[in-house]
Image (spheres, helix red, strand yellow):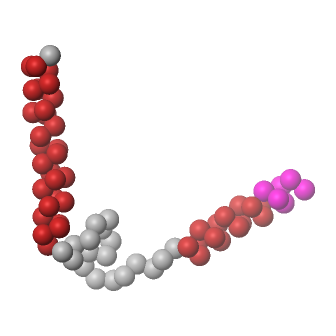
Amino acid sequence: MFSTKVGAVARNIATSAAMQYKKPTHGPGANIPFRIDNPWRLVAIFTAYCGTGFAIPYLIVRHQLLK
């Protein structure tokens, strides 16, 4: 009895997850997690993302020197 309930719950979860899946749109940029339709927004996000990565070591050194 317990195994049939567990099986039914697992089946419901699996089918509901499959039904919620949306088909991706085709074309350039369809499989990346950010939009590329606005070039200025893309430049701003790219600059913030890379700028944060490049700035972290300098901020850590500054923090250590000011301690």
Whole-percent x, y for residue 43 in the image: 12, 64
Whole-percent x, y for residue 22 in the image: 48, 77
Tell whether position 3 is magenta.
yes
Tell whether position 57 is magenta.
no
Number of callouts in the render? 0
Q: Does 55 sit left or right of 36 as displayed?
A: left
Whole-percent x, y for residue 56 in the image: 16, 37
Task: Looking at this view, name the residue that lies furthest to the top.
Answer: 67
Q: Is residue 20 above or below residue 67?
A: below
Whole-percent x, y for residue 24 in the image: 40, 78
Give the quarter of the image for residue 11: bottom right
Question: The N terminus lies in which quarter of the figure?
Answer: bottom right
> Main structural element of the magenta stretch: helix, strand or loop?
helix
Q: Does 33 sit left or right of 46 as displayed?
A: right
The residue at 17%/44% (across/down) is: 53
Q: Nearer the viewer, residue 7 or 17?
A: 17
The residue at 31%/76% (across/down) is: 30
Task: Looking at this view, name the residue that lies furthest to the front.
Answer: 66
The residue at 12%/43% (across/down) is: 54
Task: Looking at this view, name the residue that lies furthest to the right.
Answer: 1
Task: Looking at this view, name the residue that lies furthest to the bottom.
Answer: 26
Q: Nearer the viewer, residue 10 or 45?
A: 45
Q: Does 38 sit left or right of 5 as displayed?
A: left
Q: Is residue 24 above or below residue 50?
A: below
**Highlighted magenta segment, given as a residue range:** 1-6
The residue at 28%/66% (across/down) is: 34
Q: Is residue 19 above or below residue 62?
A: below
Question: The C terminus lies in which quarter of the figure?
Answer: top left
Q: Does 29 sit left or right of 3 as displayed?
A: left
